[in-house]
Image (tube, rainbow, N blue to C red):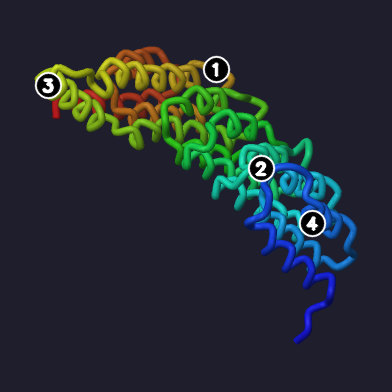
């Protein structure tokens, strides 16, 4: 089967540019950009995006980012996003600019399609896992996206990231009354689960063992037990704020108490005791009493 001349040009140019100049304005890269914007054939535009991804470099990234803003077809915009992702993840020349362009595609001020925004956000989260950027500020911003489905995805990725900086972001989401109840419930659940991904009680035991070993060797410990306790204390504080807010409904409060139990930290004991003694709702007091007994028993295991 013979390829159309224009499509053949796109494929050859893309391969030739892999080893081409990384800096400056390359006319062949510009021709690919022109095809991406001007071709009436959707398949050719997708191939042009793919070839620009192979070419990499700031010029290719600029052409891809510009084309995404005016491209009417979601399939082509997804191809552009994949090209930007390839440049970023392979650390090709222009990868920093590619990350910025992906960030724009994740922003509902600049991209209307929910699937593209979701794929862009996932790409940025994966970039954070590869230490290309810090994903937490980006996921924090995504919680203000107009789509509840997208907000839930951001909470899920924050939970999976599972590092101490997500705690305050999840805490704000848990208390944000502009978010839907399902999103807030998931944020409260994730806030309790961060301790598990960070090690919880076992993590404190590992920290203690690390301190004992490094003391014998005369070197600095990797982490202190105080830093772990402080982190868990912050989680308890944020979850307690959900319980204490009289505007929060029973399902939110019950989920917050359950999450306090998940943290399994001794700083939860006075908070739970206060709930048992003073909260006006019978079911909430009973839930707090059950969690309190579980947390107290855990301290003596």
Can residue 50 be seen in this snapshot? Answer: no
Q: Quadrant of the N terminus?
A: bottom right
User: How many numbered callouts?
Assistant: 4
Give 222 or 7, whichever is nearer the viewer.
Answer: 7
Task: Kindly check if marks 1 and 4 are in contact, taking CB atoms under 8 A apart as contact.
Answer: no
Q: Looking at the image, which residue sits at the far bottom?
A: 1
Name the residue beneath numbered marker 3: 217
Task: Kindly check if marks 3 and 2 are in contact, taking CB atoms under 8 A apart as contact.
Answer: no
Tell me the crowding category of disc 3: few under 14, some 14 to 19, or many 20 or more residues within 10 angstroms, Cα based.
few
Q: Image quarter for residue 264?
A: top left
Q: Give the CA separation, mark 3 to mark 2.
A: 45 Å
Can residue 86 be seen in this snapshot? Answer: yes
Tell me the crowding category of disc 1: few under 14, some 14 to 19, or many 20 or more residues within 10 angstroms, Cα based.
few
Taking the spot 46% from the left edge, 38% from the top edge, the residue there is 161
Dot 3 or dot 1, earlier in sequence: 3
Dot 3 or dot 2, earlier in sequence: 2
Circle 2 sits in a helix, a strand or a loop, which is it?
helix
Taking the spot 71% from the left edge, 62% from the top edge, the residue there is 14
Name the residue beneath numbered marker 2: 98
Circle 3 sits in a helix, a strand or a loop, which is it?
helix
Name the residue beneath numbered marker 4: 28
Name the residue beneath numbered marker 1: 246
Tell me the crowding category of disc 2: few under 14, some 14 to 19, or many 20 or more residues within 10 angstroms, Cα based.
many
* Residue mark closest to the camera, 3 vs 1: 3
């Amino acid at each position: 089967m013979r390829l159309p001349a224009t499509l053949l040009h796109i494929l050859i140019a893309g391969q030739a540019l892999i080893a081409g100049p990384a800096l400056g304005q390359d006319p062949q890269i510009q021709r690919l950009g022109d095809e991406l914007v001007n071709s009436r054939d959707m398949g050719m535009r997708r191939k042009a995006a793919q070839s620009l991804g192979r070419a990499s470099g700031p010029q290719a990234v600029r052409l891809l980012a510009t084309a995404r803003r005016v491209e009417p077809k979601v399939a082509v915009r997804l191809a552009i996003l994949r090209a930007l992702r390839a440049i970023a993840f392979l650390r090709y020349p222009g990868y920093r600019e590619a990350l910025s362009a992906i960030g724009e595609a994740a922003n509902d001020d600049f991209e209307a399609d929910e699937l593209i925004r979701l794929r862009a956000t996932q790409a940025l989260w994966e970039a954070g896992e590869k230490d290309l950027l810090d994903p937490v500020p980006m996921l924090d911003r995504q919680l203000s996206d107009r789509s509840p489905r997208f907000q839930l995805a951001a909470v899920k990725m924050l939970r999976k990231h599972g590092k101490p900086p997500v705690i305050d972001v999840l805490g704000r989401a848990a208390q944000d009354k502009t978010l839907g109840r399902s999103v807030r419930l998931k944020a409260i659940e994730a806030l309790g689960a961060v301790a598990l991904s960070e090690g919880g009680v076992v993590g404190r035991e590992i920290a203690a063992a690390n301190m004992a070993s490094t003391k014998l060797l005369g070197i600095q410990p990797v982490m202190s037990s105080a830093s772990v306790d402080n982190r868990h204390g912050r989680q308890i504080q944020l979850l307690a704020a959900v319980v204490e807010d009289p505007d929060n409904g029973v399902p939110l409060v019950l989920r917050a108490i359950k999450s306090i139990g998940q943290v399994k930290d001794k700083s939860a004991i006075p908070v739970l005791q206060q709930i048992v003694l003073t909260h006006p709702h019978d079911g909430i007091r009973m839930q707090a009493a059950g969690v309190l007994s579980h947390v107290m028993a855990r301290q003596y295991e």
